[in-house]
């Protein structure tokens, strides 16, 4: 079955370390997105990519980096410059263009990152 | 810039009763899509319902309906016959769309509201 796989499910990071969150999809979707969710809050967009080898900053990109070398993969690196990285991270994908406007996102199951 | 507002941090409803979750939005675009997602405590995001800005009929999906009032820029979710399994966080979201004259649509990014925690009592 097609879907999005995020790994790991739980991740612990020491202060000052970079960590990379994995996101892989086999839905043949063009666009991929990374969101951050803090407890009891909504989702905020970190980065998104609508085509391979291209990506744009979202609302809270500082302290994060991404790459999009393959259509299927959109890894997110949380760098040491991100001062408060403890959060729930969700990856999503969608088609970029189509003829049906009823086309939402498919989400992964998320990664819970904790700084220790 | 898009903005989504959910003014109800928490809502309570009795099992089998109906409940309305409020959502207002702000956009200058003519073409956009409105979505509702459910997030249980596991964290997964479950798509519930979609309403396009040009749709004249309110969307319905089983026990979910979307009360779309375009002039008021509101897109409230109505859940009928609440069940205990409906207890979760609910998010309203909006996506900007770019429609091409030749047909077809380019989809923008989703912007989410702050969410409403719904608790269903037995």
Image: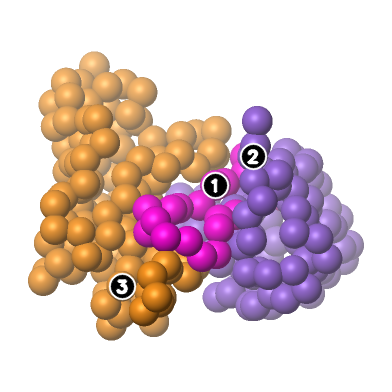
Look at mark 2 in the image and give the residue it sits on: A3
Vertical position of residue A12 compared to residue B106: above or below = above
Q: Which residues are magenta?
A: A93-116
Q: Is residue B12 visible?
A: no
Instruction: Reply above or below: A31 against A62.
Output: above
Residue B11 at x, y percent in the picture: 24, 41
Residue at 22 percent across and 65 percent down: it is B54
Please state if A109 lies on the left or on the right of B92 as rendered. Answer: right
Colour orange maps to chain: B
Q: Is residue A97 magenta?
A: yes
The quadrant in which the N terminus of chain A is found is: top right
The picture places residue A43, in percent across and down from the top left corner, at 50, 58
Cα separation, mark 2 vs mark 1, equals: 7 Å
Identify residue for label 3: B31
Q: Is residue B117 magenta?
A: no
Front tag of 3 and 1: 3
Q: Is residue A113 above or below residue B82?
A: below
Query: Camera-side residue: A61 or B122?
Result: A61
Residue at the outermost right position: A17
Residue A41, percent from left and from top: 46, 55
Residue at position x 17%, y 30% in the image: B80
């Amino acid at each position: 079955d097609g879907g999005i796989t995020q790994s790991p499910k739980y991740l612990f990071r020491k202060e000052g370390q970079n960590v990379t969150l994995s996101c892989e999809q086999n839905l043949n979707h063009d666009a991929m997105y990374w969101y951050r969710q803090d407890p009891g809050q909504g989702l905020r967009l970190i980065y998104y990519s609508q085509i391979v080898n291209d990506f744009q900053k979202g609302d809270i990109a500082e302290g994060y980096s991404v790459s999009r070398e393959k259509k299927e993969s959109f890894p997110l690196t949380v760098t040491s410059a991100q001062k408060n990285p403890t959060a729930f991270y969700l990856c999503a994908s969608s088609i970029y263009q189509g003829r049906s406007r009823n086309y939402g996102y498919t989400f992964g199951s998320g990664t819970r990152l904790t700084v220790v | 810039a898009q903005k989504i507002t959910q003014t109800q941090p928490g809502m309570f409803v009795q099992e089998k009763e109906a409940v309305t979750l409020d959502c207002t939005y702000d956009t200058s675009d003519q073409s956009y899509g409105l979505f509702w997602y459910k997030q249980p405590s596991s964290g997964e995001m479950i798509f519930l319902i979609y309403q396009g800005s040009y749709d004249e009929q309110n969307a319905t999906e089983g026990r979910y309906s979307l009360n779309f009032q375009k002039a008021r820029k509101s897109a409230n979710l109505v859940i009928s016959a609440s069940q205990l399994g409906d207890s979760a966080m609910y998010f309203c979201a909006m996506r900007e769309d770019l429609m091409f004259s030749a047909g077809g649509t380019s989809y923008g990014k989703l912007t989410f509201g702050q969410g409403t925690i719904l608790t269903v009592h037995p």
